[in-house]
Image: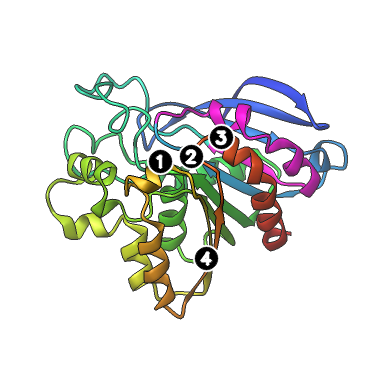
Amino acid sequence: MSVKLLSSNKCFEGEQRIYSHFSDVLGCEMKFGAYVPPANLEDNVTCPVLFYLSGLTCTHENFIQKSGMQQYAAKYGLIVINPDTSPRNLDIPGEEDSNDFGTGASFYINATQEPWSKNYQMFSYITDELVQLINQNFPVIPTKKGIFGHSMGGHGALICALKNPGLYQSVSAFAPIANPVVCPWGQKAFKGYLGDNQDLWKQWDSTYLAETYSSGPIELFIDQGCNDNFLKEKQLLPENLLQAASSNDHLQTIYKQRAGYDHSYYYIATFIGEHIAYHAKLLN
C-alpha cells in the first residue's frame, strides 16, 4: 500500500504532512494528516503512533490547523495520524444533503444498508487498512498505538478501542457522542447506515459496549466542556457511558469536566497538551 505526499510544512522542528492514498476498503481516494516529530527526523527514532478522529463536518484539515497539537507531539516524540471523517466524492444520492449524515458524518461504523454499505466502512478502514498503511509507510512502533477524537470522533475512538481489545494501548475522547442509540444525531445516522434493527445499533454504541466489555483492562479518559450546547441538548450523554463503565470491573474511567468550555476547537486547543501527555505516558 503506497501513499502520495501532498504537502509538508516544518513545525516545531518536525514536519506536518498531508498524504493521499486509494482506499480499497472505502473505494475512493482518501487524505490524512501525519505529524512526524523531530525525534524521528533528527535522531531516527522509531516512534509510537497516535490516531485522532475528527467530528461532524470536519475534514483531515481541522485538527492539524486548529488544535495546536504539533508542539506536544514534538515534545513527546509521537507520530500523529488524523484521517478524514468519511469517504468523499462517491456521487451517492443524498450524501451532501445534511451535515450530520453522509459526507463528513460516517460515525466511524461499517454501514450495512444500501447505498452506503459499499463504501461507508470507516470502522474497518480506521482499525485495519489505515493501521497497516501507517505501519508500512511510517517509522512507527506497531505495538504502541493510541487513539483519541472529538465529538463523533470521540465516539469513533471509543468504539475502536472497545471493539478491538489490545489494538490500542491508550484511548481518550473530547466531548464524545457517548450513547448514540438514544440521541438525535446517532439515531439519524444509525437508522440510515444500519437500518431499523436497534440490537445492531448497540454494537456500535460505546455505552452498550462498556456494559458488555469483558477483555483486558482499558482506561477511558473522557473530557467534557461544561458549557457545551450539545451536552445540554442531550446529544453527548457522557453520564450514560460513565454509569455503564462503573459497573464493569474491566474498565476504568477518568472524567474531566471543564468549567466554561464549549464544544469548539478553542476547547480542544486548551486541553490537547494534557491529552497528548496522557497518551505519551502510556505509549512511551
**Number of marks drawn:** 4
Instruction: Please name which of the two marks, 3 or 1, marks the residue nearer to the observer.
Output: 1
Magenta segment, which residues?
A: 57-82
Instruction: Please name which of the two marks, 1 or 2, marks the residue nearer to the observer.
Output: 1
Instruction: Please name which of the two marks, 2 or 4, marks the residue nearer to the observer.
Output: 2
Q: Most extreme residue toward the bottom, as rendered?
A: 249
Q: Do the residues labelled 2 and 3 touch (CB within 8 Å)?
A: no
Residue designated by label 3: 265
Q: Are marks 1 and 2 in contact (CB under 8 Å)?
A: yes
Q: Are marks 3 and 4 in contact (CB under 8 Å)?
A: no
Q: Where is residue 46 in the image (x, y as percent from the top left)?
A: 76, 48
Task: Look at the image and tell me in which quarter the C terminus lies.
Answer: bottom right
Residue designated by label 1: 229
Check disc 4: other Cα within 10 Å, few if <14, some if 14-19, many if 20+.
some
Helix, strand or loop at label 4? It is loop
Question: Which amino acid lies under the numbered mark 2 shown in the image of this protein?
Answer: His
Instruction: Please name which of the two marks, 4 or 1, marks the residue nearer to the observer.
Output: 1
Seen in the picture, residue 12 relative to 238 is either above or below; the reply is above
Q: Nearer the viewer, residue 90 or 265?
A: 265
Q: Is residue 203 shown left or right of residue 243?
A: left
Helix, strand or loop at label 2? It is loop
Q: Is residue 40 shown left or right of residue 211?
A: right
Residue designated by label 4: 166
Q: Which of 132 and 167 is in front in this view?
A: 167
Q: Most extreme residue toward the left, as rendered?
A: 196
